[in-house]
Image (tube, rainbow, N blue to C red):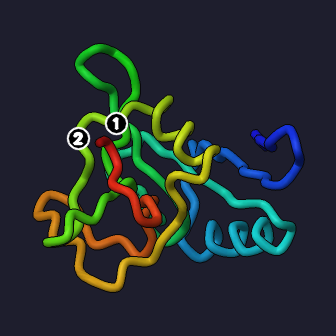
Amino acid sequence: MLATDPAGTWRIALEAQLSPITAPDITARTKRMREDGVTPCWFSDRPRPPWLGAVPSVRLATADSGGLVVAEGLMKFTGGGWAVPPGVNLTDSLRWVFTGKVLPHAPRTKLRCPLLRQLEQVWTAVRARIGR
């Protein structure tokens, strides 16, 4: 799905990747989108998609309430390192993407999340803290 702002200043492709795809293939698709001026945001609900973090992406999980939350791919820098903001629902995360509050970012320091793998790219706030 392609989302644009009313003024046409940005275009974001929301891509639910349901079928298997390799990291090189999804990276090539992402590169073509960026060349066309589109920022992609890839989604999966699979436990370990091999391409997660190779491209701007998030892994979703079902919350206890039944809604969807971001389980991986959205991070905040706390000053002492990277952390996963707790319980961010899909609606809030998309609002942050659409308003530019979060952008794809390649962390320069290790994520230090023992339960998560090291990701090459994450969605994070430019200078503000997420979830405050």
Give yes or no for contact between labels 2 and 1 (Cβ–Cβ under 8 Å).
yes
- Rendered location of residue 117, percent (x, y): 25, 67
Disc 2 is placed on an element classified as: loop
Q: Quarter of the image holding residue 87? A: top left
Q: Categorize mark 2 by other alpha carbons within 10 Å: few (<14), some (14-19), many (20+).
A: few
At label 2, which amino acid type do we have? Pro
Q: Position of residue 115 (x, y in %)?
A: 14, 58
Helix, strand or loop under label 1: loop
| Residue drawn at the location 63% of the way across and 66% of the way down | 26
Q: Is residue 52 visible?
A: no
User: Which mark, by number, is residue 86?
Assistant: 2
The three-letter amino acid code for the residue at tag 1 is: Val
Tell whether 60 sits left or right of 96: left
Q: Which picture quadrant has residue 131? A: top left
8 to the left or right of 88:
right
Residue 101 shown left or right of residue 87 in the figure: right
* x and y percentages locating residue 113 in the rendered image: 16, 64
Query: How far is disc 2 from disc 1 in space, using C-alphas?
Result: 6 Å
